[in-house]
Image (cartoon, rainbow, N blue to C red):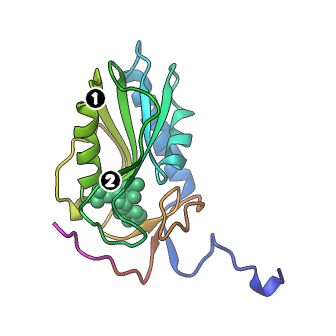
Amino acid sequence: MSSAERVSEFHNPDIEVLIDEATLKRRIAELGVEITRDYAGTTPHLVCVLKGAVVFLAELIRHIDLPLTLDFIAVSSYGNATKTSGEVRIVKDLDESLAGRDVLLVEDILDTGLTLNYLMNNFLSRGVRSLRIVTLLNKPARRIVEVPISYKGFDIPDAFVVGFGLDYAQRYRNLPFIAVLKNVVVDPPSR
Ligand code: IMP
Ligand code: MG
């Protein structure tokens, strides 16, 4: 590849940093300390919602000083666009049973609430011992369904954000910070 083709993804003119890396890491460390304290004496079972929450999960578990287990679930609600379909579908289900587990659901962003509302009800029907939600970001402006959040990293304004695991059409997950993607038209929630 010639130097002319080597355009930086991290210094892309379409993105504007909203939460820098140091701020993210500091807050995530605090969440880890809180979770460690609250779950003392138990073995929390962290369920990560693929793919967006993987970077957050990886950072978070390094600050949870407890025995813990992990599982992953993939759901589809956005497709490749910025419009919510209002429908949630499990694309990859969990490997392990949730029965009797202290489940901590790890999500990247709470937007309309449709995804977490669906997952919460789905997990409750699988006989969990307890269920809590940790989300890195909360975008309250577009909420359709209220979802109880136990742990939250940051409230953000009504903008489409990427980075630190979050994507736009599968791109930008590798940015080490949260950025606003400029010039993106986000459709209003469909219900
Ligand atoms: P909800 O079901 O509307 O709460 O949306 C949750 C999912 O939508 C998240 O897990 C993300 O995958 C996606 N999402 C919502 N807002 C954004 C955003 O600003 N950037 C990237 N993905 C988003
Ligand atoms: Mg997601």
Amino acid found under the numbered disc labelled 2:
Arg
Q: Is mark 2 within 8 Å of ligand 1?
A: no
Q: Residue at x 50, y 50 (%)?
A: 24
The local secondary structure at tag 1 comes to loop
Which quarter shows the C terminus?
bottom left
Main SS, magenta region, reads loop
Q: Residue at x 32, y 53 (%)?
A: 89
How many labels, in total?
Answer: 2
Front residue of this view, candidates 123 and 185: 123
Q: Which mark is residue 9?
A: none
Badge 2 density bin: few <14, some 14–19, many ≥20, Cα 10 Å:
few
In reply to whether residue 168 is colored magenta, the answer given is: no
Q: Answer with left or right where residue 149 lies relative to residue 160.
A: left
Residue identifier under label 1: 126
Residue at far bottom of view: 4
Q: In terms of image quarters, where does ligand 2 lie?
A: bottom left
Q: Answer with left or right where residue 73 lies relative to residue 187.
A: right
Q: Residue at x 29, y 30 (%)?
A: 131
Proximity of marks 2 and 1: CB atoms separated by less than 8 Å: no
Which quarter shows the N terminus?
bottom right
Which region of the structure is painted magenta? 186-191
The local secondary structure at tag 2 comes to strand
Q: Position of residue 86 (x, y in %)?
A: 23, 62
- Report, in whole angstroms, how far the alpha carbon at label 2 lies from the one at label 1: 17 Å
Residue at far top of view: 41
Amino acid found under the numbered disc labelled 1:
Arg
Residue identifier under label 2: 89
Q: Residue at x 56, y 55 (%)?
A: 21
Q: Is mark 1 within 8 Å of ligand 1?
A: no
User: Is residue 138 visible to us here?
Assistant: no
